[in-house]
């Protein structure tokens, strides 16, 4: 999988998407430190230890660098940034039952806006597993020569 690049100064408007989330009673918010264990456990169970490690790192910052999508006290998805490397987006994950409803797009654009507000001009999506999604939602483009990228040689369980 190649890395992708997003120009943060040219993000699409998300007003319609925000309205869609509100209509579906989905709240997007930063994760709180007190939620660390619950969120990391959910990520590990749903997406594996690698992503759980990255999300754990997101909680090392104050405020956290993890955005959550929640409905009625149930975690639907998460997105993190600045965990493996500064300026990197990800990982992002949405519960299977919540896919296709815009939750992933809302998390992606929410994090990219947070990165822009922090002063970044661009974001790198490392080893993008869903390149069509990132291109469609955020205008991401593949970075030539970026495979295998920063995760090359990473220890795996």
Image: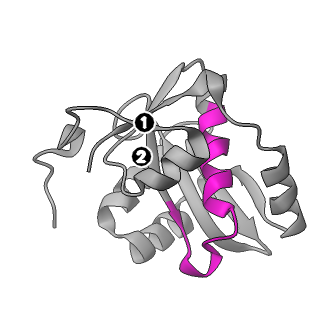
Confirm or deny contact between disc 1 and disc 2 (CB under 8 A): no
Determine the residue positioned at 47% across, 42% down: 60
Give the image location of residue 88, x and y in percent.
Answer: 42, 35
The range drawn in magenta is 93-114
Residue underneath mark 2: 57
Look at the image and say whether residue 112 sits in the magenta stretch. Answer: yes
Looking at the image, residue 106 lies above or below residue 45: above
- Report the disc number at residue 132: none
Q: Nearer the viewer, residue 4 or 132?
A: 132
**Residue 99, located in which quarter of the rendered image?**
bottom right
Q: Quadrant of the C terminus?
A: bottom left
Residue underneath mark 1: 141
Q: Residues within 10 Å of mark 2 (few under 14, many from 20)?
A: some
The residue furthest left is: 153
Q: Look at the image and tell me whether residue 142 can be seen.
A: yes
Label 2: element kind: helix
Label 1: element kind: strand
Q: Earlier in the sequence, mark 1 or mark 2?
A: 2
Q: Is residue 61 left or right of residue 52?
A: right
Give the image location of residue 47, x and y in percent.
Answer: 40, 70
**Residue 129, located in which quarter of the rendered image?**
bottom left
Q: Is residue 63 left or right of residue 128?
A: right
Determine the residue positioned at 26% across, 51% down: 1
Separation (CA) of disc 1 from disc 2: 26 Å
SS assignment for the magenta stretch, majority: helix
Q: Look at the image and tell me whether residue 59 can be seen.
A: no
Give the image location of residue 34, x and y in percent.
Answer: 62, 58
Name the mark nearer the viewer: 1 or 2: 1
Determine the residue positioned at 61% across, 82% down: 97
| Colour setup of the view | one colour
């Amino acid at each position: 999988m190649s890395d992708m690049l997003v120009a943060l100064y040219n993000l699409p408007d998300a007003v319609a998407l925000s309205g869609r989330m509100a209509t579906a009673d989905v709240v997007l918010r930063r994760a709180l430190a007190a939620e660390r264990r619950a969120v990391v456990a959910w990520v590990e169970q749903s997406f594996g230890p690698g992503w759980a490690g990255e999300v754990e790192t997101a909680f090392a910052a104050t405020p956290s660098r993890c955005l959550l999508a929640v409905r009625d006290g149930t975690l639907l998805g998460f997105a993190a940034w600045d965990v493996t490397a500064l300026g990197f987006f990800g990982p992002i994950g949405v519960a299977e039952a919540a896919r296709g409803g815009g939750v992933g797009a809302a998390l992606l654009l929410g994090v990219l806006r947070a990165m822009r507000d922090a002063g970044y001009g661009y974001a790198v999506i490392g080893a993008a597993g869903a390149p069509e999604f990132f291109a469609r939602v955020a205008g991401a483009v593949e970075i030539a020569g970026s495979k295998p990228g920063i995760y090359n040689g990473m220890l795996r369980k």
